[in-house]
Amino acid sequence: MKKLFTLTALMCLFCFTAGAQKFALVDMEYILNRIPTYERANEQLNQLSKRWEAEVEAVSLEAQTLYKNYQNEALFLSEEQKNKKEEEIVAKEKQASELKRQYFGPDGELYKKRESLMAPIQDEIYEAVKQISESEGYQVVVDRSSASSMIYASPKIDISNEVLRKLGYSN
């Protein structure tokens, strides 16, 4: 009987504690798409990406041209000349892949630039969400745009517009 009473008391305590938690949602895509500095940063990243892609493509095209020329001249070249041309082609292909890694790799220039442009915006949003959460008593704030397992959430608990107001952007 004593165990049953203790178990019931613990269950009641758990129910009261769980009911007291407040949750909120934010939609980061919605927020980011309404911040002009984010749009400018994205445009800047797109321009850099296109410029670097063109540079990598130009070096790759040079390698392809060298290879085609090699194929056309292969019959007339000595073994030493063939080796030299093959080394040129390999060096050019290596240069293209190195450029691609340098610009678009995991620690590449595009990643670093994205970090430098986006981190201040994300930090500002985080601080706004944190302030709102502390003032409203939310224990958990979930990003609606990245919560793929979320099936339904009431729009009443979405604080995205409140975050935009806190950041100084009207909705």
Image (cartoon, rainbow, N blue to C red):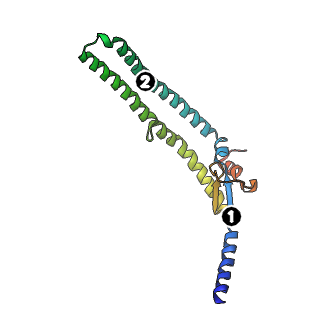
Coordinates of residue 90 in the picture (x, y in percent): 34, 25
Q: Residue at left 32%, top 14%?
A: 74
Coordinates of residue 151 in the picture (x, y in percent): 70, 53
Q: Secondary structure at mark 2?
A: helix
Disc 2 or disc 1, which is closer to the eye? Answer: 2
User: Disc 1 marks which residue?
Assistant: 22
Q: Residue at left 25%, top 17%?
A: 79
82 or 27, nearer to the observer: 82
Task: Judge the density around disc 2: few (<14), some (14-19), many (≥20) Cα neighbours within 10 Å.
Answer: some
- Amino acid found under the numbered disc labelled 2: Ser
Figure check: 96 above or below 25: above
29 or 2, nearer to the observer: 2
Q: Residue at left 53%, top 40%?
A: 117
Figure check: 87 above or below 20: above
User: Disc 2 marks which residue?
Assistant: 60
Coordinates of residue 86 in the picture (x, y in percent): 31, 21
82 or 106, nearer to the observer: 82
Task: Judge the density around disc 1: few (<14), some (14-19), many (≥20) Cα neighbours within 10 Å.
Answer: some
106 or 122, nearer to the observer: 106
Residue 97 is tagged as none
Coordinates of residue 136 in the picture (x, y in percent): 68, 62
Q: Quadrant of the N terminus?
A: bottom right
Q: Is residue 42 left or right of residue 135?
A: left
Q: Is residue 43 left or right of residue 71?
A: right
Figure check: 97 above or below 145: above
Q: CA distance from mark 2 to mark 1?
A: 55 Å
